[in-house]
Image (spheres, rainbow, N blue to C red):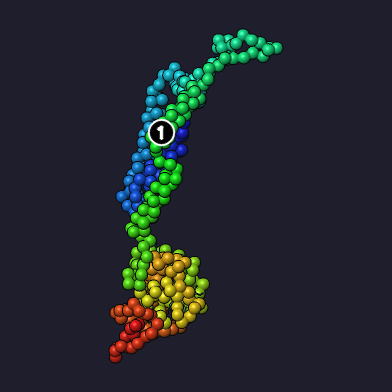
């Protein structure tokens, strides 16, 4: 019998199956498992290596043993290999079990003795695959009848209600421990993780670059790369402004609704990562110089007051 899959199909296929199984069974949140757990990436690498190694060894062993065969055995092997899967004994045996079909030579055994102008009829048995399926439906119907109509199982209406309840409980649970939790002014922190900043950058390029320029130098909106801020600097003020929009200038709308606060945190962190990049052709500084030690207050971010002689601005 021929091998069903050649090795260049077999190796990727087995690898893909293992990969899919791993992603399915390993709970890794919103990231692929092999990204979240580098050990798994290592495992996959080693696994692929072994898979290829085994293929190479097996084919080498096959070649060597082939050379050791006598001519007679080689002939037998080639004959056996030239038979396709459908013609193999194994496949034929299964087909016979499922259909109990008679070959043309055996037709005379099941031939009925009437003859309509030369048209004859065979009395074949019903194929077992069909008969057994039929019995299975009868057993299923009996069990179903007893379960739901005699011993009082749940109705479809009740089933629907339980499923909705389960889904709601699931939703609450997901909300409680998902990373998509709401970020607020008090909770917001500067993200420094490269993945978060990369996402922030993507949002920025799609939604903000039109007014602030890709490099943050500013067009309609102000320059975001200097340390001067109209509405206060630091992650809290910048987050609040992007989330709620500017009170001074409605052109800068609030983005919390469109993006979600988690994404606003990312884009705010990305904006702050542009600090000091001094892009060519950037707009001149607007607003007040922001000094980080000046802890921002939750109330508002629009009135600046000078609190001491060192001219540290605090947004109140
Ligand atoms: C339609 C144009 C426009 C778009 C789009 C826009 N902005 Fe703005 N942005 C402005 C304007 C105008 C201001 C100035 C607001 C003010 O004077 O208070 C501003 C101000 C800001 C500020 C405060 C700057 C400061 O000095 O206080 C930040 C931070 C900011 N934008 C970030 C973003 C981010 C992030 C996005 C994308 C999610 C975005 N902007 C999209 C026009 C825009």
Asked if one can make out residue 91 in the rendered structure from this viewpoint, the answer is: no
Q: Which residue is drawn at 33% across and 88% down?
A: 306
Q: Which residue is drawn at 35% across and 52% down?
A: 28
Q: Residue at x 37, y 65 (%)?
A: 182
> What percent of the width, then of the height, locates residue 55?
39, 35
Q: Nearer the viewer, residue 122 or 157?
A: 157
Above or below residue 146? Residue 237 is: below
Return the residue found at the far right.
117
> What percent of the width, then of the height, locates residue 39?
31, 50
Return the residue found at the far bottom.
309
Q: Which of 162 and 307 is in front in this view?
A: 162
Q: Is residue 198 left or right of residue 37?
A: right
Q: Nearer the viewer, residue 160 or 178?
A: 160
- Which image quadrant is residue 150 in? top left
Q: In this view, does 219 lie to the left or right of 36?
A: right
Q: Which class describes the residues within 10 Å of circle 1: few (<14), some (14-19), or many (20+)?
A: few
Q: In this view, does 228 lie to the left or right of 109?
A: left
Could you tell me which quadrant the C terminus lies in? bottom left
Asked if one can make out residue 138 in the rendered structure from this viewpoint, the answer is: yes
- Assign a secondary structure to mark 1: helix
Above or below residue 106? Residue 302 is: below
Above or below residue 182? Residue 234 is: below
Q: How many labels does the image show?
A: 1
Above or below residue 292? Residue 74 is: above
Q: Residue at x 38, y 70 (%)?
A: 269
Q: Nearer the viewer, residue 21 or 183?
A: 183
- Residue labelled with disc 1: 150
> What percent of the width, then of the height, locates residue 239?
39, 73
Task: Check mark 1 vs ligand 1: CB closer than 8 Å? yes or no.
Answer: no
> What percent of the width, then of the height, locates residue 54?
36, 36
């Amino acid at each position: 019998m021929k091998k069903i899959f050649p090795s260049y199909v077999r190796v990727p296929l087995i690898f893909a199956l293992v990969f899919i199984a791993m992603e399915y069974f390993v709970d890794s949140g919103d990231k692929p498992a092999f990204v979240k757990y580098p050990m798994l990436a290592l495992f996959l690498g080693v696994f692929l290596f072994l898979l290829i190694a085994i293929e190479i060894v097996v084919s080498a062993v096959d070649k060597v043993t082939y050379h050791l065969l006598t001519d007679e055995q080689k002939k037998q092997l080639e004959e056996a290999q030239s038979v396709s899967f459908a013609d193999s004994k194994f496949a034929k045996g299964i087909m016979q079990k499922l259909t109990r079909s008679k070959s043309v030579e055996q037709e005379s055994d099941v031939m009925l003795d009437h003859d309509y102008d030369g048209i004859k009829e065979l009395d074949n048995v019903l194929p077992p695959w069909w008969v057994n399926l039929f019995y299975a439906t009868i057993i299923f119907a009996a069990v179903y009848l007893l379960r739901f109509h005699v011993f009082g199982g749940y109705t479809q209406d009740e089933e629907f209600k339980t499923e909705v309840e389960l889904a709601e409980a699931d939703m609450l649970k997901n909300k409680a421990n998902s990373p998509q939790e709401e970020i607020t002014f008090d909770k917001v922190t500067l993200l420094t993780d490269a993945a978060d900043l990369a996402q922030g950058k993507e949002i920025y390029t799609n939604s903000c670059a039109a007014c602030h320029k890709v490099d943050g130098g500013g067009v309609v909106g102000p320059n975001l790369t200097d340390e001067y801020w109209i509405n206060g600097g630091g992650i809290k003020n910048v987050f609040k402004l992007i989330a709620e929009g500017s009170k001074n200038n409605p052109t800068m709308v609030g983005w919390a609704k469109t993006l979600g606060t988690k994404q606003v945190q990312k884009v705010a962190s990305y904006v702050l990562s542009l600090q000091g990049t001094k892009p060519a052709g950037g707009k001149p500084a607007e607003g007040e110089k922001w000094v980080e030690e000046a802890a921002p207050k939750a109330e508002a971010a629009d009135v600046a007051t000078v609190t001491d002689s060192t001219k540290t601005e605090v947004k109140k």
